[in-house]
Amino acid sequence: MQFLRAHSLKTSSEYQILKLGSVRFLVTSCRAVVLPRFGGPEVLELRSDVEVPQIKPNEVLVRTRAVSVNPLDTRMRSGYGRSIFEPLLPLILGRDISGEVTAIGTSVQSLSVGQEVFGALHPTAVRGTYTDYAILSEDELTAKPASVSHVEASAIPFAALTAWRALKSTARINEGQRVLIVGGGGAVGFAAIQLAVAAGCHVTATCGSLSIDRVLKAGAERAIDYIAEDIELAIKGKFDAVLDTIGVPETERIGINFLKRGGQYMTLQGEAASVTDRYGIAVGLPIATAILLKKQIQYRYSHGIEYWWTYMRADSDGLDEIRRLSEAGKLKVPVEKTFPFTQVREAHEAKEKRLIPGKVVLELD
């Protein structure tokens, strides 16, 4: 990373300041993994002189210590969301982060310089977290639990916020309700199980055989091996909410049929991005909206349920709850393997080829 000696500086809220002993430096550039074009892991470029923009009043500059590799990262690298992102290339990938606050904007109240934090960027952010210095808004960050390492913390927020928005913001689950998680072995599904259990819900989850024990230890009352068992015969009763992290036609059909009247079906695999990529923003977004509206009306009348596409969104209330649960040991997203930041291509290849089933994290020195 590169620094300039700071002589006539204003305040640390107006500039990115790094304090080394008694000397203060202005951060002008740093390392970042850049996506210049869409393609395989080989297109990722580690550059050492990427500009660090000045932060806005509501923004925070974070010295990155660890970032997780999400499925969204590998999909974006391959061209998912092309209609939105192609005009903005080159991009910096990455959504999750754990690190330390280096500078804060003039309107930031809840965080301070030197504080350890974790959080996640919105899915459409152009300057991501695969960089020594990331920029996030105040509501995208919260204090990192002291009991959790940077590596562990970086695996939590994007997956947990995705699950939180579905279960708490959309379905508004309450104590005593029955919740079905389709795909409970993945990061979002696993976080959803723990959030629902913490809310006092009775949770059933489908997952692969290797995840059965972990899902049960997380608090699910039933864990169903979707390969070895017939899900429709194994699941008993009706549910108040279904979160479908798989989102294929078969899991949608099963999830819809297991809902009570008035229940909520939520899928992570909404068609907005894929339809927009196919037809362009001007045509694709109206088509996607029409598809969603048609399904909502169809299922409301045929089954008496609500149907939603759900996505991660920054939410300070959600992030605070995630922090509290993580601090109490009630919310964890296990990390399967870590890679040095310089081996980002290898990390993407391992995730894409499913060589590593669990969460992968990049560590920055």
Image: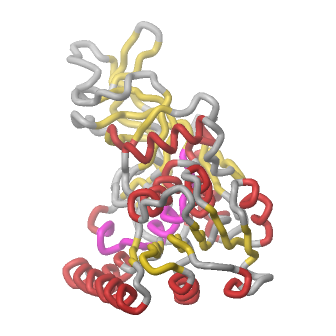
Residue 344 visible to an observer of this rendering: no
Q: Residue furthest front?
A: 176
Q: Position of residue 191 (x, y in %)?
A: 58, 56
- The front one of 149 and 258 is 258
Stretch of the chain drawn in magenta: 67-86
Q: In this view, does 217 lie to the left or right of 167?
A: right
Q: Quadrant where the C terminus lies?
A: top right
Q: Is residue 114 left or right of residue 180?
A: left
Q: Is residue 337 above or below residue 349?
A: above
The residue under the point 57% across, 89% down is: 250
Q: Where is residue 312 in the image (x, y as percent from the top left)?
A: 42, 59
Q: Is residue 254 left or right of residue 102?
A: right
Task: State which quadrant residue 261 falls in.
Answer: bottom left
Residue 75 visible to an observer of this rendering: yes
Check if residue 179 falls in the magenta segment: no
Colour convention of the picture: secondary structure
Q: Is residue 192 above or below residue 298?
A: above
- The front one of 91 and 134 is 134
- The front one of 109 and 97 is 109
- The front one of 179 and 67 is 179
Q: How many numbered tags mark residues here?
A: 0
Q: Position of residue 147 (x, y in %)?
A: 64, 31
Q: Is residue 200 above or below residue 136?
A: below
The residue under the point 52% across, 84% down is: 252
| Type of secondary structure dominating the magenta stretch | helix
Q: Where is residue 152 in the image (x, y as percent from the top left)?
A: 63, 42
Q: Is residue 130 above or below residue 102?
A: below
Q: Quadrant where the N terminus lies?
A: top left
Check if residue 81 falls in the magenta segment: yes
Q: Which residue lies furthest to the top in this view?
A: 22
The residue under the point 60% across, 47% down is: 362
